[in-house]
Structure formats: structure tokens, C-alpha cells
Image (spheres, grey):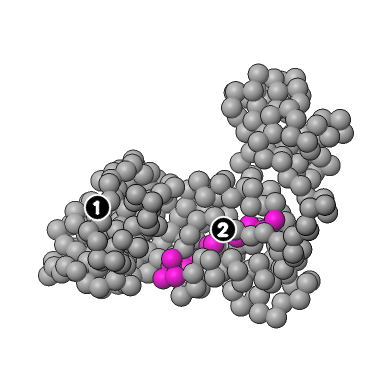
């Protein structure tokens, strides 16, 4: 007999407004302890110096983490002109300075060059692996870290304010793998100066906004009723997927990971291309994410929500 995992079978998402100074792993541990959940994970790391939306999955919701990790994200951030740091944020030591301070018109003129698909080198202090080791571990050990450029997608980038000559605020919507710290660094270089991020806040990802987030303090001495109100359903991050309601026989097959045949006209009147993903439900309860292929639905992630 398999050993029963410790904790409760809790399934769903918690959208946390992560405070300054708290690491993503620390945030996940806090939420997992509060729910006494068997399993937990997060979608998209936020550094301790960053704040905002951290999506934390519990139980079977961890199977949907890639849909949040791969989703577009929106951030607000502040750049400090005239100083570059080793980490490209306020945590690192200043490594280069410049007396030049760009004006508003110069800043707005350079933004189109940093929008769309661009080539970007991640910061040396990042979690990317180089020959099996984290880049930040190599950098902290004093090794020279060369980060190769890679394509990233910046959907939009706009200036939101210039409170003084040393600082400028921005909002960016970007795709997976984009580093805001690198964006600030490259923007400063394009403006003929140096720069680093002093504040970073994630305000949206995957259709979820900061308005839906709960503060970390909500988990202090929270009882069961309080916690239940903080949990969003597993499918909260799957709103972009078409939904198919299954009959009993088909649902039984899907529950065991088996494909089911489906006539095209039964899929809410829509036609789907091979490879399209759909959410399968039974009586409104998520059962699986499936891939459509030649008239069949092949489950790729099956949810075990029953106790």
C-alpha cells in the first residue's frame, strides 16, 4: 500500500501580493503551511527586491503552472540613471557611473527600439544555468560570466513618469524569459548613460491582475474559513482554453488518461486545428487538459481532484 502523503489535499491557486524582502520560495512555504497542503509551487520567480503578483499553485493546480509561467507578464519599474550595478538592481555594488541624465523626449524616442522581438542578454546575476551551474553562483564566486543574447518579446513599453532627473518610471508587458533588469540596463546604454532598477512590481500575468491578490498578512493566524476565501479554482488560469463538457463514459476514459473520439460538430460548433489544447470537464469540474488530434481528444494533464 502506497504511503499517504502528509498534509491536506488542497487544490487551487493563491494569488499573493508578495512583499519586499520575501523570496519566492519563502512565500510558497508560507502559503503551503497555512493550508497544510501536500504539494505547492509557484509560477514565475520574483526576486526578494521585487513585489507584486506571485501565483502559487496548490495540489493538482501545480499541473497548470506552465500556463502561468509561459504567459505574458506586466511590470511597473523605476530606473535610476547614472549608475550601473553588478546585479542591474539596487542589491548590487555600483560598477560604472555616468554624469549624463536623459530627458523625457530622449527616453520616449528610444522605447520603440526596445519593443517587439529584441535580443537581450540576461543579467550575470540570474538563475540561468551555465554548464550546470547557476549564473549567480558563478558571479558571486568572482568568475567572469558571459551571458549569450537570446530573443525575447516585449509587447509594450511606456514611460509613466520622471519624478526627478535621476529617476524614470515605466510599465512593460513582456513574454517569458524577459529580464526587466536587462531592459533597464540596455535602455540606459542606448541613452548614453548607465542605469539600474531600483523598484520592480509585477501587476499582471496570465489574465490575473494585482487587484486579485491578497497580502501576506492575510495568512497570519487565518482560520479555515478565511483561507477558503483566498483560494481560487484550478481552472482560474485556464480561461484561454475552450471547454468541453464530457458525458459519463467519455469522462471515465479521460480519468484514466485514455483518448476519446469526438465529432467536430459537438465541440460547441467550433473547428479546432490539430494540436489545439482544450479543458475537459464533467459536471463543471475540471478533469483534464487535452490535445485535439484528428477527431480525438488526448489527455495531456489529468487532474485527480477526488479524495
The part of the image, by quadrant, that contains residue 212 is bottom right
Q: Position of residue 123 (x, y in %)?
A: 30, 57
Q: Position of residue 257 (x, y in %)?
A: 74, 34
User: What element does badge 2 sit on?
Assistant: strand
Main secondary structure along the magenta-highlighted residues? strand
* Residue situated furthest bottom in the rendering: 221
Dot 1 surroundings within 10 Å: few (below 14), some, or many (20 or more)?
few
State whether residue 181 is above or below residue 305: below
In the visual, does 167 lie left or right of 194? right
User: What element does badge 1 sit on?
Assistant: loop
Residue position for label 1: 146
Name the residue nearer the viewer: 165 or 23: 23
In the visual, does 287 lie left or right of 21? right
Res. 278 in view: no
At 70% from the left edge and 56% from the top edge, which residue is drawn?
Answer: 59
Residue position for label 2: 42
Q: Position of residue 219 (x, y in %)?
A: 66, 75
Res. 172 in view: yes
State whether residue 247 is above or below residue 130: above
Q: CA distance from mark 1 to mark 2?
A: 28 Å
User: What segment carries the magenta color?
Assistant: 47-59
At 50% from the left edge and 46% from the top edge, which residue is drawn?
Answer: 70
Q: Is residue 46 magenta?
A: no
Name the residue nearer the viewer: 173 or 15: 15
At 56% from the left edge and 69% from the top edge, which residue is drawn?
Answer: 27
State whether residue 248 is above or below residue 216: above
Amino acid at each position: 500500500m502506497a504511503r499517504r502523503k502528509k498534509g491536506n489535499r488542497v487544490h487551487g491557486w493563491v494569488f499573493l501580493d508578495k512583499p519586499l524582502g520575501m523570496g519566492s520560495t519563502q512565500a510558497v512555504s508560507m502559503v503551503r503551511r497555512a493550508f497544510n497542503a501536500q504539494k505547492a509551487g509557484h509560477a514565475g520567480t520574483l526576486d526578494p527586491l521585487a513585489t507584486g503578483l506571485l501565483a502559487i499553485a496548490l495540489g493538482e493546480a501545480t499541473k497548470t503552472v506552465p500556463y502561468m509561467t509561459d504567459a505574458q507578464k506586466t511590470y511597473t519599474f523605476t530606473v535610476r540613471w547614472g549608475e550601473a550595478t553588478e546585479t542591474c538592481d539596487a542589491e548590487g555594488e555600483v560598477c560604472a557611473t555616468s554624469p549624463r541624465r536623459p530627458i523625457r523626449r530622449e527616453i520616449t524616442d528610444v522605447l520603440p527600439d526596445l519593443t517587439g522581438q529584441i535580443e537581450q542578454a540576461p543579467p550575470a546575476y540570474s538563475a540561468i544555468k551555465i554548464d550546470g551551474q547557476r549564473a549567480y553562483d558563478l558571479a558571486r564566486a568572482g568568475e567572469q560570466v558571459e551571458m549569450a543574447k537570446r530573443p525575447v518579446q516585449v509587447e509594450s513599453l511606456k514611460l509613466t513618469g520622471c519624478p526627478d532627473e535621476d529617476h524614470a518610471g515605466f510599465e512593460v508587458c513582456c513574454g517569458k524569459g524577459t529580464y526587466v533588469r536587462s531592459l533597464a540596463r540596455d535602455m540606459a546604454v542606448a541613452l548614453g548613460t548607465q542605469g539600474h532598477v531600483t523598484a520592480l512590481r509585477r501587476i499582471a500575468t496570465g489574465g490575473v491582475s494585482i487587484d486579485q491578490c491578497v497580502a501576506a498578512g492575510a495568512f497570519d493566524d487565518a482560520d479555515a474559513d478565511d483561507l477558503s476565501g483566498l483560494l481560487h479554482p484550478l481552472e482560474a488560469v485556464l480561461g484561454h482554453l475552450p471547454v468541453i463538457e464530457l458525458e459519463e463514459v467519455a469522462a471515465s476514459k479521460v480519468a484514466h488518461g485514455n483518448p476519446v473520439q469526438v465529432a467536430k460538430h459537438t465541440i460547441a460548433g467550433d473547428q479546432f486545428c490539430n494540436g489545439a489544447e482544450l479543458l475537459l470537464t464533467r459536471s463543471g469540474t475540471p478533469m483534464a487538459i487535452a490535445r485535439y488530434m484528428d477527431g480525438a481528444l488526448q489527455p495531456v494533464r489529468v487532474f485527480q481532484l477526488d479524495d
